[in-house]
Amino acid sequence: MLYFLIIITYIIFNLWVLKRIIGTKYLNKSQKIFNIIMTLIVPFLWGLLIKEVIKPPELSTLTKKNRAKRKGDFSDNCKNLTGLGDF
């Protein structure tokens, strides 16, 4: 009975990981193939790794509050181009 539960868990977890790998937009075709093969070879460890690695990027809106203060001059220097302000 214990082996049956382990096998069912293995199958469900692998199907979930494979679905996540195939459905992601962040990997190209060769990366997807590599990750599918690694999921089948190293089932639980690779699946947990993929779960943590494949995530959408955290995008944030650049608001006035988040921008660096500029001096107000229109000179073409490094501080104004990068938005880093005073060094």
Image: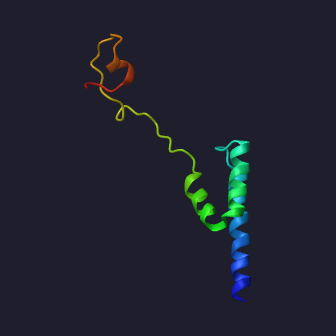
Camera sees residue 23: no
Left or right: residue 56 compared with residue 23: left
The quadrant of the picture occupied by the N terminus is: bottom right
Q: What residue lies at 73% left-to-right and 52% top-to-bottom?
A: 22
Q: Pinpoint residue 40: horizontal percent, then vertical percent.
A: 72, 62
47 in relation to 4, above or below: above
Q: Pinpoint residue 73: horizontal percent, then vertical percent.
A: 29, 12
Camera sees residue 76: yes
Left or right: residue 63 compared with residue 28: left
Q: Nearer the viewer, residue 41 or 62?
A: 41
Left or right: residue 87 compared with residue 83: left
Q: What residue lies at 57% left-to-right and 51% top-to-bottom?
A: 55
Quarter assignment of residue 66: top left
Quarter assignment of residue 37: bottom right
How many numbered callouts? Answer: 0
Q: Pinpoint residue 69: horizontal percent, then vertical percent.
A: 30, 26
Q: Nearer the viewer, residue 39 or 70?
A: 39
14 in relation to 23, above or below: below
The quadrant of the picture occupied by the C terminus is: top left
Q: Residue furthest top?
A: 75
Q: Nearer the viewer, residue 43 or 17?
A: 43
Q: Residue furthest front?
A: 41
Quarter assignment of residue 14: bottom right
Q: What residue lies at 50% left-to-right and 41% top-to-bottom?
A: 59
82 in relation to 30, above or below: above
